[in-house]
């Protein structure tokens, strides 16, 4: 078109150009102008259609978005696999790479601490375990007989992944309160007649939590009558004689065991603890001799001597604080080499100091294995 206009302008300047030739050129220009108009209209139509297409693309259907997300997730999974492969190759030297902008604390956590989450336990079976207390489950301070009720349920059984239904039948009904899938809790074997009546009625899957046999004086003829026996106080001969006997570490008179939903990282360091050592408890066995030795050698140790569950006993919270504020916790023998404060000290980050027991077959520290780091005198 530019060429035609240019040529026409040049030729129109010639004097010798006749009218008929000029009229022909103007007709040609008019025809080409109409073609340009049609092309412009078509161009505008195409631009409108293009805008509509772009709008539709920006408003993709949900399934289109899902497909796009699937592609994106697949790409991310490929990247994760690549990073994991690279991390496995360098696992022996260092943790995952840390951005330079991280703080010193965040850097330490990223390099030394893996990802964590609170455990989530789901029932693998809806079939309940019936936890039947043939001993009064109320603590001593409130007129009961034991203080381990919640410890048994919340600590010993906390990974059972089945519903636990608690029963505490009235005194006059305890000998006749029977149900299958049952774990009875009893103190000093006062209720062993229970198992004979339960078997006579055809009940199955029966266990007993045997408490209180510190001196290993209780009879053992009841053990084969139960499907399983949980008991405190380690005894290698008993476990060898009866495969259905399972040792459970002692806990917990002072209430520490059922309050373990705390973060260990909040415990004070040894250098931040007020007391070098502590002993809180009753005087049994050679405990008085231990306290006399501390006094003779000028070792200052936080002590509180009381009778078992007596009025002078420390509140569980104060007891816990005492252990948390002590570098060491003295764990001399009582009626048995296994004392609750051994585990209570470990729970609170205090180092338990124990004594070597005369018979390794009954020493709980032997059961922990020869490589344990606990000091034994």
Image (spheres, grey):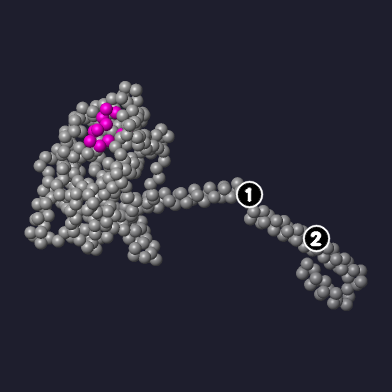
**Percent of width and height locating residue 5:** 80, 71
Q: Which residues are magenta?
A: 183-194
How crowded is the residue under tag 1: few (<14 C-alpha within 10 Å), some, or many (20+)?
few
Whole-angstrom CA distance, mark 1 to mark 2, is: 36 Å
Judging depth in this view, the residue of 57 and 224 nearest the camera is: 224
| Residue plotted at (24% across, 43% down) | 250
**Percent of width and height locating residue 181:** 36, 30
Q: Are marks 1 and 2 in contact (CB under 8 Å)?
A: no
Judging depth in this view, the residue of 22 and 202 nearest the camera is: 202
Judging depth in this view, the residue of 128 and 150 nearest the camera is: 150
Image quadrant in which you'd find residue 173: top left
How crowded is the residue under tag 2: few (<14 C-alpha within 10 Å), some, or many (20+)?
few
- Vertical comparison of 269 with 2: above or below: above
Q: Quadrant of the N terminus?
A: bottom right
Judging depth in this view, the residue of 64 and 229 nearest the camera is: 229
Q: Regarding mark 2 in the picture, which secondary structure is present there?
A: helix
Which residue bears the numbered disc 1?
A: 61
Q: Would residue 352 be counted in the magenta stretch?
A: no
Image quadrant in which you'd find residue 172: top left
**Percent of width and height locating residue 78:** 45, 49
- Vertical comparison of 71 with 172: above or below: below
Which residue bears the numbered disc 2?
A: 38
């Amino acid at each position: 078109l530019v060429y035609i206009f240019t040529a026409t302008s040049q030729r129109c300047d010639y004097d010798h150009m006749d009218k008929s030739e000029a009229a022909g050129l103007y007709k040609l220009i008019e025809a080409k102008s109409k073609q340009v108009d049609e092309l412009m209209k078509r161009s505008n139509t195409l631009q409108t259609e293009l805008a509509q297409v772009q709008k539709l693309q920006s408003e993709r259907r949900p399934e289109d978005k899902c497909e796009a997300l699937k592609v994106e997730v697949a790409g991310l999974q490929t990247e994760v696999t690549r990073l994991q492969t690279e991390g496995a190759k360098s696992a022996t030297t260092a943790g995952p790479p840390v951005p330079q902008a991280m703080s010193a604390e965040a850097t330490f956590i990223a390099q030394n601490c893996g990802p964590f989450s609170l455990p989530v336990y789901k029932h693998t079976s809806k079939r309940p375990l019936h936890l039947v207390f043939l001993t009064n489950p109320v603590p001593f301070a409130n007129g009961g007989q034991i203080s381990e009720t919640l410890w048994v349920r919340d600590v010993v059984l906390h990974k059972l992944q089945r519903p636990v239904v608690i029963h505490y039948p009235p005194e006059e009904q305890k000998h006749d309160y029977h149900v299958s899938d049952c774990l009875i809790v009893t103190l000093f074997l006062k209720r062993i007649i229970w198992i004979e009546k339960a078997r006579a009625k055809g009940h199955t899957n029966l266990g007993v939590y045997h408490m209180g046999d510190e001196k290993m004086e209780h009879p053992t003829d009841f053990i084969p009558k139960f499907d399983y026996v949980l008991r405190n106080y380690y005894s290698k001969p008993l476990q060898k004689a009866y495969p259905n006997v399972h040792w459970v570490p002692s806990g917990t008179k002072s209430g520490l065991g059922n309050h373990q939903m705390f973060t260990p990282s909040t415990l004070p360091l040894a250098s931040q603890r007020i007391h070098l050592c502590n002993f809180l408890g009753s005087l049994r066995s050679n405990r008085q001799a231990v306290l006399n030795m501390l006094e003779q050698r000028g070792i200052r140790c936080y002590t509180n001597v009381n009778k078992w569950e007596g009025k002078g006993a420390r509140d569980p919270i104060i007891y816990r604080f005492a252990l948390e504020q002590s570098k060491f916790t003295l764990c001399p023998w009582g009626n048995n080499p296994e004392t609750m404060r051994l585990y209570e000290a470990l729970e609170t980050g205090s180092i338990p100091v124990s004594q070597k027991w005369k018979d390794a077959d009954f020493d709980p520290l032997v059961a922990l294995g020869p490589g344990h780091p606990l000091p034994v005198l």
